[in-house]
Image: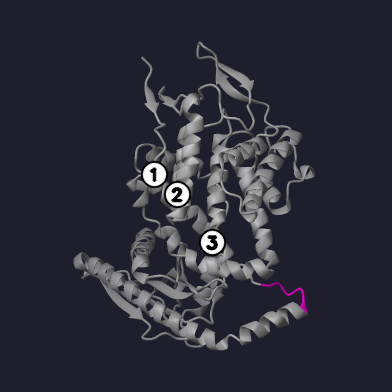
Amino acid sequence: MDKVFRLWKPVAFTDAWRKCDTSVLDDIAPSWLSRRKELQEDSKEYKEFLERLKREHAVETGVIEQIYDLKKGITETLIKEGFVKSYLSHGDTNVSKDDLMNHLGDHLDAVDFVFDMIKQNRPLSVGFIKELHQLTTRHQKSAEGRDQFGNRLKIPLLKGEFKERENNPTATDGTKILYCPPVHVDAEMDNLVKIYADLVEAKINPLIIAAWFHHAFVTIHPFQDGNGRVARLLASLIFIKFGFFPFTVLREDAKVKYINSLEQADNGLVQPLVSYFGEVQRKNIEVALNIKEVEETSLDKVVSILNKKLSEQSLNKESYFKISSFIYDVYGICEEEIIKISKVLTKKNHKQVKINHFRTTSVVKGRPIFPFYEQVLSYSKLNNYHFDNTMPKMFTGISITLINSKLAYRIILPIHGYGFSKNVIGIGTLLESQDLNIEDQNWNPIPPNIPPHIISIEGELENKSKNIKKYIEESFTLALAQIVNEI
C-alpha cells in the first residue's frame, strides 16, 4: 500500500503562528519604515533598487520552479540592466531565448500587478488571486498530470481557474503528498482570504501573516500548476502592503532554507518559516538603509533639502541625545556578555591565557578620539554599508594573550552609526592579531569577516537584547574558532 501524507487541513490560524518570535524583523523595521518615507520622495537610487528587486524576483521564481535555468553571470546582468534578449549568449539558459524572455516578462508583469494592486488600495480577493495566476502563467502551455494508471502526462493548463483534478506529488521516498481536493478548493480559498482580512484587522504582525498565508496557500495548492510562484507573489503583496519588499527565494536558499522550513511548518513547527521570511526582508532593509536620500543632480533640490535639514537642527540635537543613551544601553548588554565569555575562557586556561577587557568610558563623537576609526571604516566597506562617523559611538572587547607563544589577539565590538538613517546602529566584530616576539609590531586584521548586527533605536531595547546577546555569542565563537585555527 502506498504511503500518503495529508498535507492539507482546513485552513485555520493557530496559536502556534500567533506566538512566533518576529524579532528578526522587528529589531530593524521601525527605522526602515521611517527612512522609507524620505526615500519615496526624492531618491532615484531607491526607485532603481526596487526595480532590481522586482527583476530578481522574476528571475529567481522561475529558476527554483525549474521552468528554466540561468547561469549566475547572466542572472546578475539581467537583474542589473533589464530583460534584454541580446544580453544572452549560447549556453546561458536551457530554454530558447524567446521562451525565457516570455516567462521573465510574465513574472515581472505579475510583480508589477502586485505593486499596482497595493497602490490602488484594492482588497485581496479570490478574483485577484485568479487574475494573478493567469498573468503569471500567460506563456505556460501545459502542466504535469497523471492518467488513471498513475502515468505522467502533459495536460492543458487552466489559467486563472482552480484545478479540476488532483495534483498530488510523490516525494523522493515514495510518499504521496495530498493537497486539498478540487471539490473543496473554492470554500478553502474563500476562507483563506477571510482569515487574512481578519488578521490584518487584528493587527497581527505582517511577518506572521505573510508566512502563514504562504504556507496555507501551498497546502491548498488551488491551481493545477504555478502554486509556488503565486504563493511567493501573495507573500510579497502582504509585505509590500506593510512597507516592505517583495519576497524572493534565491536559488541557493531554495532547498536548505525555504523548502526545509516549509516542511517543518507542515509538521507543526512554524517558527523556522517565520524566521526565514524575516531574514529575507532584513537583508533587503540593510541594503535599503544605505541608499542616499537625494542624488547630486539638481542644485535647487540639494539646497532645498539642505535648508530643510538645517531647520531641524534642534530636533537633531534631541535625536543625538536619544541615540547616545540607546548606544550606552546597548554597550551595557555587550559588556555583560563579554564578561561572561571572559570568565569561560580563563576558567580552565588561566595559566596559558591572559585576558584583558578594554572599553570606552563614555559616548564619544568625531574621528580624532575614536581609536578604531580606520578599522571600522574598512569593515564597513567590506560589508557594503555606510559608516556614519557623525553618530555617537562606543566600543568594547577583549584581548587574548597566549603566554607561551607570545601571540596576542583582540576581538573588538564597535557600536556605531549604520547607513544613512540617523536612528539605526550596527554592532560590528573585528579580529586582530599581534606577534609579541616582534618589537613594535602593529595590530593586523585577520578573518573571519563577521557581518554587523543592525538595530533600530526605536522600540524597546529589552525586546532586542536577546538577539544582541545571540550575535555576541555567535561572533565570539567564530572569532575564537579562527584563533584556534591560527595557533
How far across and how far down the image is residue 82, in percent?
Answer: 73, 50
Amino acid type indicated by mark 1: Phe
Residue pointed to by mark 3? 285
Q: Can see residue 168? A: no
- Mark nearer the N terminus (3 vs 1): 1
How far across and how far down the image is residue 466, in percent?
Answer: 33, 63
What coloring was used for the rendering? one colour
Image: magenta residue range: 294-299
Amino acid type indicated by mark 3: Ile
The image quadrant where one finds the N terminus is top left
Q: Is residue 409 above or below residue 95?
A: below
Q: CA distance from mark 3 to mark 1?
A: 28 Å
Q: Can see residue 7? A: yes
Residue pointed to by mark 1? 13
Callout 1 secondary element: loop
Callout 3 secondary element: helix
Residue pointed to by mark 2? 198
What residue do we see at 35% from left, 37% from top? 267
Residue farthest along the top direction in this orientation: 149
What residue do we see at 69% from left, 70% from top? 42
What residue do we see at 73% from left, 32% from top? 96
